[in-house]
Amino acid sequence: MNTPTRSFRRLLALLLSAAALLGAGCAKDIPVFTPPAERTVASHDKAWPRNHYLTLAYHAIQDGVADQSFIAVRTDQLVAQLQWLRMNGYQAVSVDQILAAQKGGPELPPKAVLLTFDDGYKDFYTRVIPLLRSFHWPAVLAPVGSWMLTPASQPVIFGDEPAPRELFLNAKELGQVAKSPLVEIGAHTFASHKGSQGNPQGNLMPHMANHQYLPDQQRYETSQEFQQRVRDDVRAVTRTIIETTGRKPRVWVWPYGRASGEALQIIREEGYELFLTLEVGLADVQKPDNVPRLLMTGRDNIESIAALMVDEAPSPNLRVAHIDLDYLYDADPAQQAKNLDLLVQRIADMKINTVFLQAFSDPDGDGLVREVYFPNTVLPMRADLFNRVAWQLASRGGVRVYAWMPVLSLALDDSYPRVSRWNPADGQVAVDPGQYQRLSPFNARNRAAVGRLYEDLARHASFAGVLYHDDALLSDFEDAGPDALAAYERAGLPQDIRAIRADPALMQRWTRFKSQALVQFTQELTDKVRRIRGPEIKTARNIFAAPILDPKAEQWFAQNPDDFLNAYDWTAPMAMPYMESVPRQDANRWLDQLVDHMAQRPGALQKTIFELQTRDWRQPGAHASSTAQLIDSQVIATWMRRLQLRGVQHYGYYPDDFTQDHPVLKDIRPHMSITWYPYP
């Protein structure tokens, strides 16, 4: 996003036509009235979705005090939870039932539950098996192969620490457990349930899901090295379970719930059919590669457990801070470390759940990406910083991090064709100096280069999703380059921009073609990322406000909100009134209308994140450290509250300047914290 380029000045003139939508009079600060029949149904009142199931992830089951080093649940808690499930109509199902339903067999019952137990604790043999027999409910047990084979005289290396050997099943005991018709033995790796160095700064990251950083060689594992390591581990644990139980495992449980797309492909090739993570939500029998689970810990309160189970289906309300890594980067490593600590503490104190984190560098704010913050083969690397910050925010700040990435505005050499504009005055075709300098999305070499950049990001960082930047746009005079014209011809359009613009029907077809081409390109990038990082990666894309407020504005941007809602997990409108030259006195009304226009689409607000602005780029002082542009935090807080009153579920702001405490934490925390205000 950064400081708007000169192109916006031309576009803003067009956007002023949208200001007419504001109308007259003053908007009232009251919630929109929604008739009862149109109101959102609470998750616990909705019908259970067909062929979906809730998966519960247990670990150790202990009497007395439940040791949270092993994420233990007390025996009496487990009994109470199973009783609550049965009394409230839940039915435990087996892996056989799930796989049969996936292949078109009998449907799962409503309120289906899959019980899973990780790590291979001995208490499964002594405590869980009797309970399963009592309830006549099936379950999955996923041991770690090397822990099970550890000699009785040695401690188990539990992650990176020694643990008492007697806590874990041995091979003979697992063989006895496997004889029960109620138990499915899965796999939890052979020796990869641990952390390994994931970046030059020394962060320990899940060994099975990330390329290791090799400090003695000052490099990351190659894909070939990573894949061989994974294959060796999978074959070792598979062989161990077959030798111990006589059955080949079908269920793979990712250590720490962290998946890898590269590893997934290998594990699938080794015969596994169901892959369990710790993502949020209900599992779908048609999505065996990404089975979310609810992590069960030593909570004492059965009511809180019940609430978690009942509300597991919907996504939580998102509260998003959009962060520039350029604010954090410093040539002095000591100062950079202080900046990182300051950022992580701020995010933790804010108690939000999502961060959109810049993975590229744009200190000049001109929208042209010349460097990135991760190792890659396409652009210079300013610093290997994104992975460290993303991991620290996730592990210490407790948030899900989306990698904010450019789509087209990469500063590659001149052999890569740029988006060009047809000039109606003289018919000449040239790059528009007032617009984002973008690679033509219709050129195969450009697409391949951008794709490599995304693949490199996926190999060298751990993150939960991708936010596609607002540079994925084409004006009503673009693209006019030879690759674009050839694409138009293949789509049955003229190769003459003048002819297209002169015919309203052709103009509409051309607009839709470009909008869909940009969506398809980002979907190709998503596929590349998911093949490496895993199917659980989410997607979001920034959209300008004008195409939401006025359908005709699709011509000026090649962006359509209906396309976005269908293509991405999240649509992120730039709800930035000052950026759209809206007068200050009309900003509230403009926000209301933006929300109302989006809400006209059924279910749209459930998938839309409204991004507010914290700087007024119309003001002088474009440098990031300037205070001239800062919007008063009370104004921002008022906007947030207004969005809530209008029915918005998900929102955030850009940029967060943690170096200046802007927006002021004490002012916005009541409106951003999911702890203070979890619901609008």
Image (cartoon, rainbow, N blue to C red):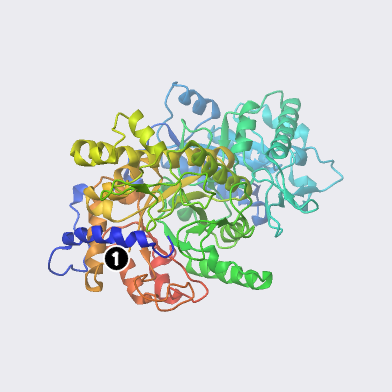
The vertical placement of 539 against 616, above or below, is above
Residue displayed at 26% across by 45% down: 602
Find the residue positioned furthest to the right: 153
Q: Quadrant of residue 454?
A: top right
Direction from residue 61 to residue 175 in the image, left or right: right
Front residue of this view, candidates 208 and 12: 12
Measured from the top left, where is residue 18 in percent x and y? Answer: 21, 58
Q: Is residue 167 above or below residue 674?
A: above
Q: Residue furthest bottom?
A: 627
Q: Position of residue 655 (x, y in %)?
A: 44, 66
Image quadrant in which you'd find residue 266: top right
Give coordinates of residue 514: x percent, y percent: 34, 40
Residue 425 visible, this angle: yes
Q: Residue at x 77, y 33 (%)?
A: 171
- Is residue 294 or residue 617 the one in the foreground? 617
- Amino acid at dot 1: Pro
Query: How many discs appear?
Result: 1
Q: Which residue is mark 1?
A: 577
> Which quarter of the image is occupied by the C terminus?
bottom left
Q: Nearer the viewer, residue 159 or 264?
A: 264
Q: Residue 489 is drawn in which quadrant? A: top left
Element under label 1? loop
Nearest the viewer among 309 and 530 is 530
- Which quadrant would the N terminus be assigned to in this image? bottom left
Residue drawn at 48 percent across, 47 percent down: 280
User: What percent of the width, then of the height, locates residue 228?
Assistant: 73, 35
User: Neighbour class for label 1 at 10 Å: few (<14), some, many (≥20)?
Assistant: many
